[in-house]
Image (cartoon, rainbow, N blue to C red):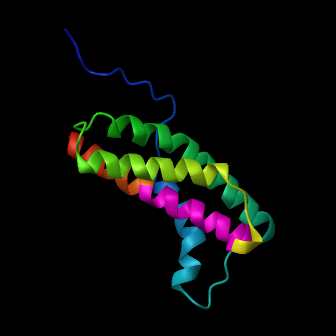
Amino acid sequence: MNTTRPNTRTTPVDIATMRETVNRLLDPDAVPEALPPTGDELQALTALVRGHLALLVPEVEAAARTLEENSVHRYTVLGCVWEARSRLETQPSPRFGGAPGYARRLARALNALCDHYEALNEAAR
C-alpha cells in the first residue's frame, strides 16, 4: 500500500523569486542611503508578496503537518504559518508605518516561510 501523500501542488514554488521580492522591500533597511519603494512600486511589491504568501502558506503548512505531532519544530512552523495568515488578514495602518510598514511586515513573514520551506525540504531529502 502506498502511504505517500500525492503531490497536489499546481504551481511550482520559486523561492529565489520570493527572496528577491523580500530583498526589494527589506534591503533599504540595511543600506541607509537606499530609499524604500513608494507609490506604484510599493503597491506592486505588496501585491506580489501577498501572492507569494498565498502560494507558500499551504505548502509550508502541509509539510509541517508531516512532522512528528508533538515536535517543537512542527509547532514553530505552524506558528509561522499562523503569523503569515494573520498578516494577510490585516490592512496598512498609520500607527504601524502605513503601507511601507505593512509591506515590510508581509515581507518578513514571507522570508520566514521561505526559511521553513527550505529547511523542511532539506529534511525530506
- Viewer-closest of 88 and 59: 88
Task: Assess whether residue 58 is covered by the magenta stretch.
Answer: no
Percent coordinates x, y for residue 20 in the rendering: 52, 62
Figure label count: 0
For the question of whether residue 37 can be seen, the reply is: no
Which residue is at the far right? Answer: 39
For the question of whether residue 86 can be seen, the reply is: yes
Which residue is at the far front? Answer: 70
Residue 32: quadrant of the picture: bottom right
Give the dominant element type of the magenta stretch: helix, strand or loop.
Answer: helix
Residue 35: quadrant of the picture: bottom right
The residue shown at (58%, 51%) is: 86
In the image, residue 1 sits, relative to residue 37, either above or below, namely above
Which residue is at the far top? Answer: 1
Percent coordinates x, y for residue 63 in the rendering: 34, 37
**Residue 54 as seen in the image, left or right of residue 73:** right
Q: Check the picture and name the quadrant holding the C terminus.
A: top left
Q: Which residues are magenta?
A: 96-112
**Residue 55 as seen in the image, left or right of residue 78:** right
Task: Assess whether residue 101 is covered by the magenta stretch.
Answer: yes
Percent coordinates x, y for residue 75 in the rendering: 33, 47
The residue shown at (58%, 80%) is: 28
Q: Check the picture and name the quadrant holding the N terminus.
A: top left
- Viewer-closest of 73 and 29: 73
Percent coordinates x, y for residue 94 in the rendering: 76, 72
**Residue 33 as seen in the image, left or right of residue 61:** right
The residue shown at (53%, 52%) is: 84
